Image: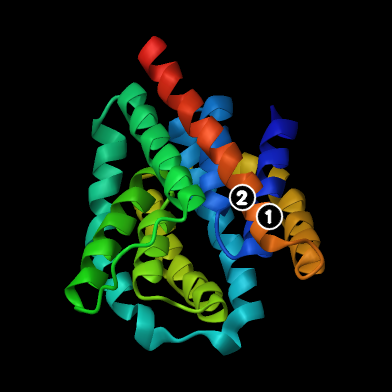
Amino acid sequence: MDILVATVVFLAAFTQSLSGFGSALVAMAFLPAVIGIQAASPLVAVTVLTLEAILLVIYRQALNFQVIWRVIAGSLAGVPLGLLLLERVPERIVLLLLGVVILGYALYALLEIRLPTLRAPIWAYFFGLLAGMLGGAYNTSGPPVVIYANCRRWQPLEFKSNMQGFFIFSSLLVAGAHFINNNLTVAVWRYFALSLPALLLGILAGTRLDGVIDARTFQRIVLLLLALMGFRLILGQIGG
């Protein structure tokens, strides 16, 4: 089990280091089936926070805080709602919803749907709220922000840097909320300590191969894998 957790953490760190996002989606697609949703959610929270802190140092010069502060503000209200969902809703339903989120986002990204341009500031708060809820419950705050970024037509470098800026604030909120709710148990910290070398190795591999591997092709492979995992989660809860 420890080897499986470390392997998933490596893949998650490698994915985000190479493409700029996706670590939580990868981790939450696999870890709940290995250690359960109650342990997986806080473990991914602290692991992803560590990953994003390192990547933010790498991309700090391109960060534009003026672009993302409204999204961050919206997520402030969403995180507690997501944690409430995680604690009050049965695990089977949580896993089913997680599968729907993962599959839905993977299909959206694979189909490359062109969404309308959103200019009104209210949309930043709305997508931030959704991101906070998904982050608090499943550590998957990325999909709403990715969709919002596409609606604002962010350029590649702007996208990569701003996503890290949002993720670090979102992850701080989620990890802090897990701490307050006593979800960071001894078992969670043990998994984190065991997977830390895999996390660092994934960052090293991703940053070294950035520019060598075609990031677009790699992302499509990851998205196909996520679609399969989301579909498997859905079938597992429906058929279980």
- Which SS class for mark 2? helix
- Which SS class for mark 1? helix
Residue at position x 45%, y 86% in the image: 64
Label 2 amino acid? Arg
Q: Position of residue 100 (x, y in %)?
A: 37, 35
Residue at position x 17%, y 73% in the image: 122
- Tell me if residue 187 can be seen: no
User: Looking at the rendering, in which quadrant would you find the C terminus?
Assistant: top left
Picture disc at residue 220: 2
Q: Nearer the viewer, residue 15 or 197?
A: 15
Q: Is residue 71 above or below residue 107?
A: below
Q: Nearer the viewer, residue 185 or 167?
A: 167
In which quadrant of the rendered view does residue 129 lie? bottom left
Picture disc at residue 86: none
Quick check: 216 left or right of 206? left
Q: Position of residue 214 (x, y in %)?
A: 74, 62
- Tell me if residue 97 can be seen: yes
The residue carrying pointer 2 sits among few (fewer than 14), some (14 to 19) or many (20 or more) residues within 10 Å by Cα, namely: some
Tag 1 residue: 217
Label 1 amino acid? Thr
Q: Position of residue 142 (x, y in %)?
A: 43, 57
